[in-house]
């Protein structure tokens, strides 16, 4: 009788190596294709296949069902952590191969182990003396190249605007989630923008900048070659995160090469997909609501949900009011949180200036709350004081006391009438008191503000009017100097100065600036006049003016861009208001340094403030 065996193979169901047995007697088949355990036939091969399939590949239901041995779960977790390094660094030369894992088990597993049953018997005895015998050493799972990967280069979370967003990595070119994925909760969508993530993680930053440079049209790109070298130089010179990446790149190239790169020249569609973060919008249960590369596009369909949530919060809280002319709001909370429209919403209540009345509404950010509330409180104080005024109040008293010369000086202004100008001066006086105190959120704080405003209202109003007369005189002189004939080479500078003058003096500028900032106007206008005077020399003076303008133009544009990006009717927040006056002081330091500035001001300080106001 003769026995032959064929097709030895691993059986996950039996946790053993099986084969087919054929039995013949003088060539006559007695048994054909009988399934048997191959461990009885070839111990070495059966043991090798068991180790490879059960332990290395994990093809053993006892291990994968959650009822398996503890060492295997630990090893799988360690291996996943090692593989995560490859996903982060986008390399396949970090984790050891399966042959290394086989050699590890082969050197430790008993010689008699050829199946799951054999392993269980052997391991039950062995683990009592050597419980960590089969647990991987993390150092054995990676090659020496792993030391080149720093944790800080591939962080597992992103910090922005005081919020933390989890980051995951995946290395599979062409896959939907290739690159890094940032989880953004729905409730925080209104607090972040794509620019917050524009610099990417440090480990991908150099590649990102290099690829961005390569997307430029040839006539621009030739100024920045070789692209990898220019990318490294840029990253070494510019601190990351203080401004959006493209703003920083454009400013750096302009300052180092004199080449202006227009925003539309960058082509994000040519940047490799893995260098553009994938955003995953999730609800409070962790369920994915939307996914994509364009954060602003993801926000759009979800905006109605957020608006609905805010409306429901206002309705449910019962605090929304409109058409009020006195403090009837009780205590206005700094913020409160409710669950609406499927997610948690933090609402920020604020008084709202409605023109002839005041309302109370809720907003989605503390920044908008601050900007709305200060103006709402000011309007309420003005309405209250107007009701209490006798015989026209301080505005009429000041107007009646003006000389003809003073009335003439005030008449030549952007305002429709002197009375309108004086009302704006009064608004500035009230705003100054409001800004000097913590936000009034209850009746007692509001009454204290009203008493303080009423006490010295007329005297303060007269002081502001005196400042306005001086400002208007300097404004008219500057306007006259800028309207004269000029050489073509001076046109960019003159356009810049005219725009500055229009931002400084316009209808409503007194209440917008406030008494404190108004006192700086004479310096601003004096610096402008000196700039115009020097420009008249032509030649080198024009070239020098252009160099100085290059230092502020992109800052000015960034500020105006953020201002234009505000939704219609939304006033600028504290950070943007601060940036506005920092820019004016910076102009003084550039063109009339001898006039001095009340505080240190520089390119970097303004950029930092711009980053805070984004």
Image (cartoon, grey):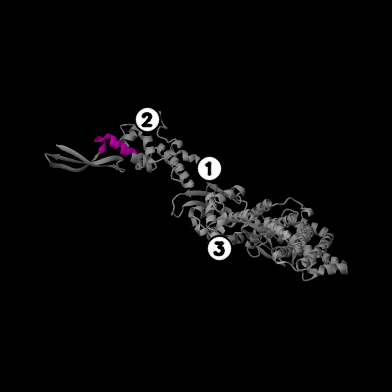
- The residue indicated by pointer 1 is 151
Sequence-wise, the earlier of marks 3 and 1 is 1
Would you call the spot at circle 1 few (<14 residues within 10 Å), some (14-19), or many (20 or more)? few
Residue 182 is left or right of residue 325, and the answer is left
Mark 3 falls on what kind of element? helix
Q: Position of residue 15 (x, y in %)?
A: 31, 40
Does 355 sit above or below residue 47? below
Q: CA distance from mark 3 to mark 2?
A: 63 Å
Residue 308 is left or right of residue 383, and the answer is left
Residue 210 is left or right of residue 508, and the answer is left
Q: Position of residue 403 (x, y in %)?
A: 88, 68
Magenta-drawn segment: 38-51
Q: Residue at x 61, y 48 (%)?
A: 237
Mark 1 falls on what kind of element? helix
- The residue indicated by pointer 3 is 304
Sequence-wise, the earlier of marks 3 and 2 is 2
Q: CA distance from mark 3 to mark 1?
A: 39 Å
Q: Residue at x 27, y 34 (%)?
A: 43
- The residue indicated by pointer 2 is 126
Marks 2/1 in contact by CB < 8 Å: the verdict is no
Residue 309 is left or right of residue 422, and the answer is left
Marks 3/1 in contact by CB < 8 Å: the verdict is no
Would you call the spot at circle 2 few (<14 residues within 10 Å), some (14-19), or many (20 or more)? some
Does 204 sit above or below residue 390? above
Visible residue check, residue 25 = yes
Would you call the spot at circle 3 few (<14 residues within 10 Å), some (14-19), or many (20 or more)? few
Q: Decide which of 278, 454 is in the foreground and name it.
A: 278
Q: Residue at x 42, y 35 (%)?
A: 135
Q: Position of residue 598 (x, y in %)?
A: 77, 52
């Amino acid at each position: 009788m003769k026995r032959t065996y064929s097709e030895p193979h691993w059986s996950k169901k039996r946790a053993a190596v099986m084969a087919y047995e054929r039995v013949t007697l003088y060539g006559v088949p007695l048994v054909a294709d009988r399934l048997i355990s191959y461990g009885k036939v070839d111990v070495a091969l059966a043991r090798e296949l068991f180790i490879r399939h059960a332990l290395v590949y994990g093809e053993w239901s006892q291990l994968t069902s959650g009822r398996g041995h503890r060492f295997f779960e630990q090893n799988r977790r360690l291996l996943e952590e090692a593989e995560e390094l490859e996903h982060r660094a986008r390399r396949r030369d970090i984790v050891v191969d399966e042959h290394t894992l086989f050699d590890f088990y082969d050197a430790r597993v008993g010689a008699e182990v050829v199946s799951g049953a054999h392993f269980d018997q052997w391991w039950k005895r062995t683990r009592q003396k050597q419980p960590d015998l089969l647990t991987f050493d993390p150092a054995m799972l990676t090659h020496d190249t792993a030391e080149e990967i720093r944790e800080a280069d591939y962080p597992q979370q992103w910090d922005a605007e005081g919020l933390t967003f989890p980051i995951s990595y995946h290395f599979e070119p062409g896959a939907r989630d290739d690159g890094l994925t940032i989880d953004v909760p729905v409730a925080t969508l209104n607090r972040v923008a794509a620019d917050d993530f524009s610099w990417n993680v440090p480990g991908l930053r150099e590649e990102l900048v290099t690829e961005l440079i390569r997307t430029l049209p040839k006539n621009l790109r030739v100024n920045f070659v070789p692209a990898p070298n220019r990318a490294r130089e840029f990253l070494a010179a510019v601190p990351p995160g203080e401004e959006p990446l493209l703003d920083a790149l454009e400013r750096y190239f302009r300052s180092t090469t004199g080449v202006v790169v227009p925003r539309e020249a960058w082509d994000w569609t040519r940047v490799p997909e893995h260098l553009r973060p994938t955003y995953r919008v999730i609800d409070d249960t962790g369920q994915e609501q939307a996914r994509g590369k364009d954060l602003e596009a993801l926000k759009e369909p979800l905006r109605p949900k957020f608006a609905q949530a805010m409306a429901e919060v206002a309705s449910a809280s019962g605090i929304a009011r409109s058409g009020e002319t006195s403090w009837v709001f009780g205590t206005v909370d700094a913020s409160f949180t409710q669950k609406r429209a499927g997610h948690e919403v933090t609402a920020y209540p604020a008084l709202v200036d409605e023109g002839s009345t005041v309302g109370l509404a809720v907003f989605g950010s503390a920044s908008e709350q601050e900007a709305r509330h200060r103006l709402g409180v000011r309007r309420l104080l003005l309405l209250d004081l107007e009701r209490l005024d006798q015989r026209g109040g301080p505005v009429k008293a000041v107007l009646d006391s003006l000389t003809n010369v003073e009335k003439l000086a005030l008449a030549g202004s952007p305002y429709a009438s002197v009375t309108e100008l004086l009302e704006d001066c009064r608004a500035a006086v009230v705003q100054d008191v409001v800004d000097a105190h913590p936000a009034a959120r209850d009746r007692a704080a509001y009454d204290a503000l009203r008493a303080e405003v009423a006490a010295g209202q007329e005297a303060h109003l007269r002081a502001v009017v005196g400042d306005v007369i001086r400002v208007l005189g300097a404004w008219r002189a500057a306007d006259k100097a800028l309207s004269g004939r000029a050489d073509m080479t001076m046109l960019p500078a003159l356009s810049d100065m005219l725009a500055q003058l229009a931002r400084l003096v316009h209808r409503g500028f007194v209440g917008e600036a406030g008494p404190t900032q108004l006192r700086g106007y004479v310096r601003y206008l004096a610096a402008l006049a000196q700039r115009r005077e020097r420009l008249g020399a032509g030649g080198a003076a024009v070239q020098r003016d252009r160099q100085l303008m290059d230092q502020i133009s992109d800052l000015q544009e960034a500020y105006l861009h953020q201002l234009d990006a505000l939704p219609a009717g939304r006033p600028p927040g504290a950070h943007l208001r601060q940036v506005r006056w920092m820019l004016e002081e910076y102009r003084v330091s550039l063109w009339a340094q001898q006039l001095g500035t009340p505080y240190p001001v520089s390119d970097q300080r303004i950029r930092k403030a711009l980053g805070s106001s984004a």
